[in-house]
Image: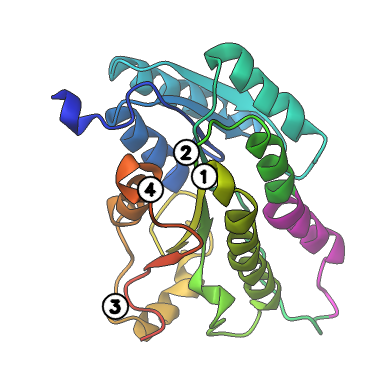
Amino acid sequence: MSASSKPLTGKVALVTGGARGLGAATARKLAEMGADIAITFVSPSSVSKAAAIVAGIEQLGGRGIALQADQGDVSTAPQMIGSIIERFGRLDIVINNASIDRFGNVDDPQRDDEDFERYWAVANTGLRAIVRAASRVMTDGGRFVFVGSNLSVRPGAAGMSDMASIKASIDGYARGVARDLADRAITVNVVHAGFMETDINIDFRDSIRPLLQNLCFKRFGRLEEVVAPIAFLASPAASYITGTIIDADGGYNV
């Protein structure tokens, strides 16, 4: 592979939730582009998956590290970012991908409110803790890419009120952070990821399949179709793009 096809050579990227699904595919793509990669995972059952991702990064010629960190616990963020700096000496790119999904009507008497509070802790509070910690050590000209969803503007079905609110908060937060970090030439953008077939949604995939009828392309997206804009926004080519949202969702809002 030529040097021109490895635009991230010398860069260090963090991909949260990088042991499976979209996160794993993103980590591999950024490694192909030349970056050294740190991934995070939370479940002990993901140790072997995370190790396999790191091994794949190393086979591509890069350096990799897997860090077990619970994004729902904000106290872990500074230590996790510190481990990356200790291992690689720098941090240039953060892909905020890790999240969980929770569905349920607000008036459901069987709703587990504690479980939904856990969702908020992971997808909202924990994300912001990582951004705060990472932004303080990120190199000037760095990249933040948040993985969001067009549920932020169109829930599309009942039971998605919390998801819609969290995804909307990600969009607004990214725009604010873009302003905060502009004087350091750090870009901050969002990719609205569409419905994909991954091991993460296998248990409830049939329940979201009817939503495909809302799309222009009435099918699940392929991982590489969503990874592509993430990788672009992480690259030097996106140096004049910040505070924006790219929809990679098959035309959900059209």
Asked whether the beta carbons under mark 2 and mark 1 sit within 8 Å of each other, the answer is: yes
Question: Is 119 part of what is drawn in magenta?
Answer: yes
Within-10-Å neighbours for mark 4: few <14, some 14–19, many 20+: some
Disc 2 target residue: 141
Image: 99 above or below 195: above
Residue 11, position as x, y percentages in the image:
41, 26
Q: Residues within 10 Å of mark 3 (few under 14, many from 20)?
A: some
Q: Which residues are magenta?
A: 109-125
Look at the image and tell me whether residue 232 can be seen: yes
Mark toward the start of the polypeptide (3 vs 2): 2
Mark 3 — residue?
218
- The percent position of residue 196, horizontal first and vertical second, equals 39, 60
**Which residue carries the number 1 mark?**
186
Q: Which residue is mark 4?
A: 239
Percent across and percent down for residue 224 are 29, 50
Please state which of residues 101 and 67 is positioned toward the viewer in this rendering: 67
Front label number (4 vs 3) = 4
Disc 2 residue crowd, few under 14, some 14–19, many 20+, Cα 10 Å = some
Q: Whole-Å distance between the Cαs marked 4 and 1?
A: 8 Å
What distance separates the C-alpha of mark 2 from that of mark 1?
Answer: 5 Å
The amino acid type, in three-letter code, at marker 2 is Gly
Of the two numbered discs 4 and 3 on the same chain, state the one appearing first in sequence: 3
- Find residue 138 and report its image quarter: top right
